[in-house]
Image (cartoon, grey):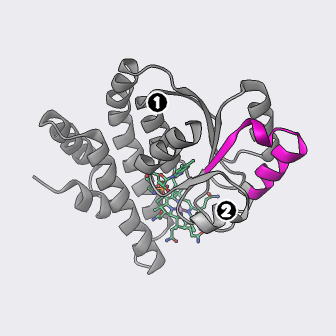
Amino acid sequence: MADLKELIIDLGDVDEVKRIVKDEIGSGKEPTKIIDQVTEALTEVGKRYDRGEYFLSELMMAGIIASEVSKILEPLLAESKKKATSKGKVIIGTVKGDIHDIGKNIVIMMLQATGYDVIDLGIDVPVEKFTETVRKEKAKVLGMSALLTSTMYEMGKVIEGLKKEGLRSDVKVILGGRPITKDFADEIGADGYAKDSVRAIKVVDCLIG
Ligand code: B12
Protein backbone atom coordinates (compact mmCIF):
# COMPACT_ATOMS: atom_id res chain seq x y z
CA MET A 1 0.00 0.00 0.00
CA ALA A 2 1.30 3.48 -0.86
CA ASP A 3 2.53 5.55 2.07
CA LEU A 4 0.08 8.32 2.97
CA LYS A 5 2.76 10.89 3.75
CA GLU A 6 4.68 10.23 0.53
CA LEU A 7 1.51 10.28 -1.53
CA ILE A 8 0.55 13.72 -0.18
CA ILE A 9 4.10 15.04 -0.71
CA ASP A 10 3.95 13.83 -4.32
CA LEU A 11 0.47 15.37 -4.67
CA GLY A 12 -1.03 12.02 -5.55
CA ASP A 13 -4.60 11.37 -6.56
CA VAL A 14 -7.08 12.68 -3.94
CA ASP A 15 -9.29 9.58 -4.21
CA GLU A 16 -6.26 7.36 -3.59
CA VAL A 17 -5.37 9.45 -0.51
CA LYS A 18 -8.94 9.16 0.78
CA ARG A 19 -8.93 5.41 0.21
CA ILE A 20 -5.69 4.97 2.18
CA VAL A 21 -7.01 7.12 5.04
CA LYS A 22 -10.19 5.04 5.22
CA ASP A 23 -8.15 1.80 5.12
CA GLU A 24 -5.89 3.05 7.92
CA ILE A 25 -8.90 3.96 10.04
CA GLY A 26 -10.43 0.59 9.24
CA SER A 27 -7.32 -1.15 10.51
CA GLY A 28 -7.53 0.75 13.79
CA LYS A 29 -5.11 3.63 13.30
CA GLU A 30 -5.67 6.59 15.63
CA PRO A 31 -6.97 9.72 13.79
CA THR A 32 -4.30 11.79 15.56
CA LYS A 33 -1.57 9.60 14.01
CA ILE A 34 -3.05 10.29 10.57
CA ILE A 35 -3.04 14.03 11.37
CA ASP A 36 0.68 13.73 12.22
CA GLN A 37 1.38 12.19 8.80
CA VAL A 38 -0.53 14.96 7.02
CA THR A 39 1.30 17.63 9.02
CA GLU A 40 4.70 16.10 8.18
CA ALA A 41 3.74 15.89 4.50
CA LEU A 42 2.65 19.54 4.40
CA THR A 43 5.89 20.57 6.08
CA GLU A 44 7.83 18.86 3.29
CA VAL A 45 5.59 20.48 0.66
CA GLY A 46 6.40 23.85 2.27
CA LYS A 47 10.13 23.08 2.05
CA ARG A 48 9.83 22.21 -1.64
CA TYR A 49 7.97 25.49 -2.19
CA ASP A 50 10.82 27.28 -0.38
CA ARG A 51 13.40 25.60 -2.63
CA GLY A 52 11.44 26.59 -5.74
CA GLU A 53 10.62 22.98 -6.61
CA TYR A 54 6.89 23.53 -6.00
CA PHE A 55 4.79 26.56 -6.88
CA LEU A 56 1.55 28.10 -5.57
CA SER A 57 -0.59 25.61 -7.50
CA GLU A 58 1.18 22.77 -5.67
CA LEU A 59 0.65 24.49 -2.29
CA MET A 60 -3.04 24.76 -3.15
CA MET A 61 -3.24 21.12 -4.18
CA ALA A 62 -1.60 20.04 -0.90
CA GLY A 63 -4.13 22.23 0.95
CA ILE A 64 -7.05 20.60 -0.87
CA ILE A 65 -5.75 17.08 -0.13
CA ALA A 66 -5.28 17.91 3.58
CA SER A 67 -8.81 19.37 3.77
CA GLU A 68 -10.24 16.19 2.26
CA VAL A 69 -8.42 14.11 4.87
CA SER A 70 -9.77 16.41 7.62
CA LYS A 71 -13.32 15.86 6.33
CA ILE A 72 -12.90 12.10 6.82
CA LEU A 73 -11.41 12.49 10.31
CA GLU A 74 -13.90 15.10 11.57
CA PRO A 75 -16.83 12.74 12.32
CA LEU A 76 -14.48 10.33 14.13
CA LEU A 77 -13.16 13.06 16.40
CA ALA A 78 -16.73 14.34 16.85
CA GLU A 79 -17.62 10.87 18.17
CA SER A 80 -15.10 11.32 20.97
CA LYS A 81 -16.72 14.68 21.71
CA LYS A 82 -20.05 13.06 22.48
CA LYS A 83 -18.35 11.00 25.16
CA ALA A 84 -16.72 14.03 26.82
CA THR A 85 -18.45 16.54 29.12
CA SER A 86 -18.11 20.23 28.20
CA LYS A 87 -14.92 21.77 29.54
CA GLY A 88 -15.74 25.34 28.48
CA LYS A 89 -15.89 27.65 25.51
CA VAL A 90 -12.95 28.49 23.22
CA ILE A 91 -12.99 31.14 20.48
CA ILE A 92 -10.53 30.61 17.64
CA GLY A 93 -9.68 32.29 14.35
CA THR A 94 -6.95 32.96 11.80
CA VAL A 95 -5.77 36.57 11.99
CA LYS A 96 -6.42 39.33 9.45
CA GLY A 97 -4.61 38.97 6.13
CA ASP A 98 -4.10 35.24 6.59
CA ILE A 99 -6.21 32.54 4.93
CA HIS A 100 -4.36 29.42 6.17
CA ASP A 101 -6.82 27.31 8.14
CA ILE A 102 -5.84 23.65 7.92
CA GLY A 103 -3.88 23.72 11.19
CA LYS A 104 -6.52 25.82 12.95
CA ASN A 105 -9.21 23.36 11.85
CA ILE A 106 -7.19 20.44 13.18
CA VAL A 107 -6.82 22.23 16.52
CA ILE A 108 -10.59 22.82 16.52
CA MET A 109 -11.30 19.14 15.85
CA MET A 110 -8.99 18.13 18.70
CA LEU A 111 -10.50 20.70 21.10
CA GLN A 112 -14.00 19.47 20.29
CA ALA A 113 -12.94 15.85 20.59
CA THR A 114 -11.60 16.54 24.08
CA GLY A 115 -14.76 18.29 25.23
CA TYR A 116 -14.49 22.01 24.44
CA ASP A 117 -17.23 24.06 22.78
CA VAL A 118 -15.53 25.93 19.97
CA ILE A 119 -16.60 29.12 18.23
CA ASP A 120 -14.74 29.21 14.92
CA LEU A 121 -14.37 32.74 13.53
CA GLY A 122 -12.79 31.41 10.34
CA ILE A 123 -10.00 33.12 8.43
CA ASP A 124 -8.87 36.71 7.83
CA VAL A 125 -10.45 37.79 11.12
CA PRO A 126 -10.13 41.50 12.01
CA VAL A 127 -9.28 42.70 15.55
CA GLU A 128 -12.84 43.96 16.21
CA LYS A 129 -14.36 40.58 15.39
CA PHE A 130 -12.11 38.89 17.98
CA THR A 131 -12.86 41.50 20.67
CA GLU A 132 -16.63 41.61 19.96
CA THR A 133 -16.87 37.82 20.21
CA VAL A 134 -14.89 37.73 23.46
CA ARG A 135 -17.33 40.30 24.91
CA LYS A 136 -20.43 38.50 23.65
CA GLU A 137 -19.53 34.85 24.25
CA LYS A 138 -17.70 35.10 27.58
CA ALA A 139 -15.34 32.34 26.46
CA LYS A 140 -12.52 31.21 28.73
CA VAL A 141 -9.91 31.04 25.98
CA LEU A 142 -9.16 32.92 22.76
CA GLY A 143 -6.95 31.12 20.23
CA MET A 144 -5.32 32.81 17.26
CA SER A 145 -3.58 31.22 14.31
CA ALA A 146 -1.11 32.80 11.86
CA LEU A 147 1.01 31.05 9.22
CA LEU A 148 2.70 34.08 7.68
CA THR A 149 5.49 36.11 9.22
CA SER A 150 3.69 39.15 7.79
CA THR A 151 0.43 38.45 9.66
CA MET A 152 1.69 37.20 13.03
CA TYR A 153 1.91 40.80 14.29
CA GLU A 154 -1.88 41.03 14.01
CA MET A 155 -1.95 38.90 17.16
CA GLY A 156 -0.38 41.71 19.17
CA LYS A 157 -3.02 44.08 17.80
CA VAL A 158 -5.78 41.78 19.04
CA ILE A 159 -4.24 41.67 22.52
CA GLU A 160 -4.00 45.50 22.50
CA GLY A 161 -7.65 45.59 21.33
CA LEU A 162 -8.70 43.40 24.26
CA LYS A 163 -6.86 45.71 26.67
CA LYS A 164 -8.46 48.81 25.15
CA GLU A 165 -11.90 47.27 25.54
CA GLY A 166 -11.19 46.24 29.17
CA LEU A 167 -11.50 42.55 28.26
CA ARG A 168 -7.94 41.29 28.65
CA SER A 169 -8.39 39.82 32.13
CA ASP A 170 -11.59 38.01 31.06
CA VAL A 171 -9.89 35.63 28.65
CA LYS A 172 -6.71 33.57 28.30
CA VAL A 173 -4.97 34.07 24.97
CA ILE A 174 -3.21 31.20 23.21
CA LEU A 175 -1.30 31.42 19.94
CA GLY A 176 -0.31 28.94 17.25
CA GLY A 177 0.91 28.62 13.69
CA ARG A 178 4.18 27.93 11.93
CA PRO A 179 6.11 31.17 12.69
CA ILE A 180 4.95 31.47 16.32
CA THR A 181 7.46 30.84 19.12
CA LYS A 182 7.25 30.98 22.89
CA ASP A 183 9.41 34.11 22.85
CA PHE A 184 7.02 35.81 20.44
CA ALA A 185 4.02 34.83 22.58
CA ASP A 186 5.73 36.22 25.69
CA GLU A 187 6.77 39.37 23.86
CA ILE A 188 3.24 40.31 22.81
CA GLY A 189 1.74 39.33 26.18
CA ALA A 190 -0.12 36.11 25.30
CA ASP A 191 -0.82 33.51 27.99
CA GLY A 192 0.31 30.50 26.00
CA TYR A 193 1.54 29.04 22.76
CA ALA A 194 1.45 25.56 21.23
CA LYS A 195 3.50 24.04 18.45
CA ASP A 196 0.87 21.48 17.44
CA SER A 197 -2.67 20.35 18.13
CA VAL A 198 -1.75 17.82 20.80
CA ARG A 199 0.21 20.42 22.77
CA ALA A 200 -2.63 22.92 22.13
CA ILE A 201 -5.02 20.77 24.17
CA LYS A 202 -2.51 20.46 27.01
CA VAL A 203 -1.94 24.22 27.11
CA VAL A 204 -5.67 25.03 27.02
CA ASP A 205 -6.36 22.46 29.78
CA CYS A 206 -3.60 24.03 31.82
CA LEU A 207 -4.77 27.63 31.25
CA ILE A 208 -8.31 26.79 32.26
CA GLY A 209 -6.94 24.97 35.26
C1 B12 B 1 -1.27 24.68 2.43
C2 B12 B 1 -0.54 26.01 2.38
C3 B12 B 1 -1.19 27.07 1.74
C4 B12 B 1 -2.63 26.97 1.25
C5 B12 B 1 -3.55 27.17 2.48
C6 B12 B 1 -4.83 26.37 2.38
C7 B12 B 1 -5.61 26.43 3.66
N1 B12 B 1 -6.90 26.25 3.53
O1 B12 B 1 -5.09 26.61 4.76
C8 B12 B 1 -2.69 28.16 0.24
C9 B12 B 1 -2.33 27.66 -1.13
C10 B12 B 1 -4.02 28.91 0.17
C11 B12 B 1 -1.53 29.03 0.72
C12 B12 B 1 -1.40 30.37 0.38
C13 B12 B 1 -0.28 31.13 0.69
N2 B12 B 1 0.84 30.71 1.32
CO1 B12 B 1 0.94 29.02 2.24
N3 B12 B 1 1.38 27.32 2.88
C14 B12 B 1 0.76 26.18 2.95
C15 B12 B 1 1.66 25.08 3.60
C16 B12 B 1 2.24 24.19 2.51
C17 B12 B 1 1.02 24.19 4.64
C18 B12 B 1 0.31 24.90 5.79
C19 B12 B 1 -0.43 23.88 6.59
O2 B12 B 1 -1.62 23.70 6.42
N4 B12 B 1 0.33 23.09 7.40
C20 B12 B 1 -0.20 21.92 8.12
C21 B12 B 1 -0.85 22.32 9.41
C22 B12 B 1 -1.41 21.08 10.09
O3 B12 B 1 0.17 22.87 10.20
P1 B12 B 1 0.05 24.32 10.86
O4 B12 B 1 -0.82 25.20 10.03
O5 B12 B 1 1.37 24.80 11.26
O6 B12 B 1 -0.82 24.03 12.18
C23 B12 B 1 -0.33 23.30 13.30
C24 B12 B 1 0.40 24.17 14.33
O7 B12 B 1 1.00 25.30 13.77
C25 B12 B 1 -0.62 24.45 15.36
N5 B12 B 1 -1.55 25.58 15.19
C26 B12 B 1 -1.99 26.18 14.07
N6 B12 B 1 -2.88 27.15 14.38
C27 B12 B 1 -3.00 27.16 15.71
C28 B12 B 1 -3.78 27.97 16.56
C29 B12 B 1 -3.69 27.78 17.92
C30 B12 B 1 -4.52 28.64 18.81
C31 B12 B 1 -2.81 26.79 18.45
C32 B12 B 1 -2.71 26.62 19.89
C33 B12 B 1 -2.05 25.98 17.61
C34 B12 B 1 -2.16 26.16 16.25
O8 B12 B 1 -1.39 23.26 15.38
C35 B12 B 1 -1.58 22.81 14.04
C36 B12 B 1 -1.78 21.32 14.03
O9 B12 B 1 -0.71 20.62 14.57
C37 B12 B 1 2.75 25.98 4.30
C38 B12 B 1 4.10 25.32 4.55
C39 B12 B 1 4.23 24.83 5.99
N7 B12 B 1 5.16 23.99 6.20
O10 B12 B 1 3.54 25.25 6.89
C40 B12 B 1 2.79 27.20 3.36
C41 B12 B 1 3.24 28.59 3.89
C42 B12 B 1 2.67 28.86 5.26
N8 B12 B 1 2.64 29.51 2.92
C43 B12 B 1 3.45 30.47 2.60
C44 B12 B 1 3.15 31.50 1.67
C45 B12 B 1 4.28 32.45 1.30
C46 B12 B 1 1.86 31.63 1.13
C47 B12 B 1 1.37 32.74 0.18
C48 B12 B 1 1.82 34.17 0.55
C49 B12 B 1 1.81 32.35 -1.25
C50 B12 B 1 1.52 33.39 -2.31
N9 B12 B 1 2.58 33.80 -2.94
O11 B12 B 1 0.40 33.79 -2.50
C51 B12 B 1 -0.17 32.58 0.29
C52 B12 B 1 -0.73 33.48 1.41
C53 B12 B 1 -2.22 33.57 1.43
C54 B12 B 1 -2.71 34.31 2.66
N10 B12 B 1 -3.00 35.58 2.54
O12 B12 B 1 -2.80 33.72 3.72
C55 B12 B 1 4.77 30.39 3.35
C56 B12 B 1 4.87 31.43 4.48
C57 B12 B 1 6.26 32.05 4.56
C58 B12 B 1 6.35 33.15 5.55
N11 B12 B 1 7.54 33.33 6.03
O13 B12 B 1 5.44 33.83 5.91
C59 B12 B 1 4.81 28.90 3.79
C60 B12 B 1 5.57 28.66 5.10
C61 B12 B 1 5.46 28.10 2.64
C62 B12 B 1 6.95 28.40 2.49
N12 B12 B 1 7.79 27.53 3.00
O14 B12 B 1 7.30 29.39 1.96
N13 B12 B 1 -0.68 28.33 1.49
The image quarter containing residue 137 is: top right
Taking 129 as reference, is 49 above or below it? below
The picture places residue 7, in percent across and down from the top left corner, at: 24, 58
Which disc is residue 112 wearing? 1
The picture places residue 145, in percent across and down from the top left corner, at: 60, 51
Which disc is residue 158 wearing? none
Q: Residue at x 47, y 70 (%)?
A: 55
The picture places residue 189, in percent across and down from the top left corner, at: 73, 57
Residue range of the region highlighted in magenta in the rendering: 156-174
Q: Closest to the observer: 115 or 55?
A: 115
- Going by the numbered disc 2, the residue's amino acid type is Asp
Label 2 sits on a secondary structure element that is helix
Q: Residue at x 61, y 56 (%)?
A: 146
Q: Closest to the observer: 205 or 48?
A: 205
Q: Residues within 10 Å of mark 2 (few under 14, many from 20)?
A: few
Q: Residue at x 38, y 40 (%)?
A: 70
Q: Closest to the observer: 63 or 206?
A: 206
Instruction: Report the mark closest to the observer, 2 or 1.
Output: 2
Q: Closest to the observer: 12 or 23?
A: 23
Q: Is residue 205 left or right of residue 127?
A: left
Taking 104 as reference, is 111 above or below it? above
* Of pointers 2 and 1, the one earlier in the residue sequence: 1
Q: Residue placed farthest to the right in the image?
A: 164
Q: Residues within 10 Å of mark 1 (few under 14, many from 20)?
A: many
The answer to whether the residues at label 2 and label 1 have Cβ atoms under 8 Å apart is no
- Reading the image, the residue beneath label 2 is 186
Q: Is residue 125 left or right of residue 70?
A: right
The picture places residue 13, in percent across and down from the top left corner, at: 27, 51
- Going by the numbered disc 1, the residue's amino acid type is Gln
- Main secondary structure of the magenta stretch: helix
Magenta stretch holds residue 159: yes
**How far separated are the C-alphas under marks 2 and 1?**
26 Å
